[in-house]
Image (cartoon, rainbow, N blue to C red):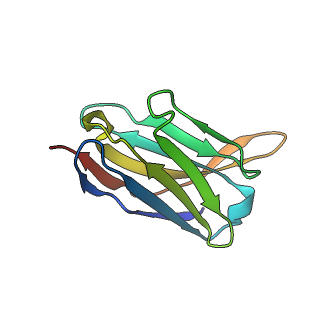
């Protein structure tokens, strides 16, 4: 299992920005695709964005054009830059590590989450 620790959450006004970080340890970071998910109160966890081991990115339509995922393999860290934040972005944000080979895809770690609150 990979240990993942998120940071960077907090309180921000609508239209503001935050950058989340997720530091990984205990595995081969460069071999994993890394993702961000979020869960708002009373709702299911939902996908936000993912970056593959090769650097290809994808994000949910709800955050496209506002959020950017990136990674620094030298620091074993994945980032989520969140701009133009909206109240509906309020949630606990979780980091995920996933290993994929020819035969299977396996989640190898989840972080504990970091709270993001967007409110005026």
Picture coordinates of residue 105, whole percent (x, y): 70, 41
Q: Quadrant of the C terminus?
A: top left
Q: Which quadrant, please, contains the N terminus?
A: bottom right
Q: Is residue 73 above or below residue 111?
A: below
What residue appears at the point 32 percent right and 38 percent down from the top-left corner?
Answer: 89
Q: Is residue 83 above or below residue 23?
A: above
Q: Is residue 68 left or right of residue 98?
A: left
The total number of labels drawn is: 0
Residue located 46% across and 42% down the image: 37
Pick whichever, 42 or 64, lies toward us. Answer: 64
Q: Dividing the picture into quarters, in which one does residue 18 lie?
A: bottom left
Determine which quarter of the picture holds residue 114. Answer: bottom left
Q: Residue furthest top?
A: 61
Locate residue 92 relative to residue 63 in the image: left or right.
left
Residue at the extreme right: 102
Q: Residue 88 falls in which quadrant of the image? A: top left
- Furthest residue toward left: 120
Q: Is residue 35 left or right of residue 90?
A: right
Residue depicted at x 42% and y 57%: 19
Residue nearest the viewer, comparing 2 with 83: 83
Residue 20 in the image, given as x and y percentages of width and height: 43, 58
Residue 44, percent from left and from top? 36, 32
Q: Residue at x 33, y 47 (%)?
A: 92
In this picture, is 27 found above or below 38?
Answer: below
Q: What is the x, y in percent for residue 57?
A: 65, 42
């Amino acid at each position: 299992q990979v240990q993942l620790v998120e940071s960077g959450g907090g309180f921000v006004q609508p239209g503001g920005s935050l950058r989340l970080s997720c530091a990984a340890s205990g595995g081969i970071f460069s071999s994993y695709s890394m993702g961000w998910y979020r869960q708002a109160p009373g709702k299911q966890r939902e996908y936000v964005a993912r970056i593959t081991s090769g650097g290809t990115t994808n994000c949910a339509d709800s955050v496209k054009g506002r959020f950017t995922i990136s990674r620094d393999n030298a620091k074993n860290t994945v980032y989520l830059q969140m701009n133009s934040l909206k109240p509906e972005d309020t949630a606990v944000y979780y980091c995920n590590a996933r290993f994929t080979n020819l035969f299977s895809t396996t989640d190898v770690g989840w972080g504990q989450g970091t709270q993001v609150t967007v409110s005026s």
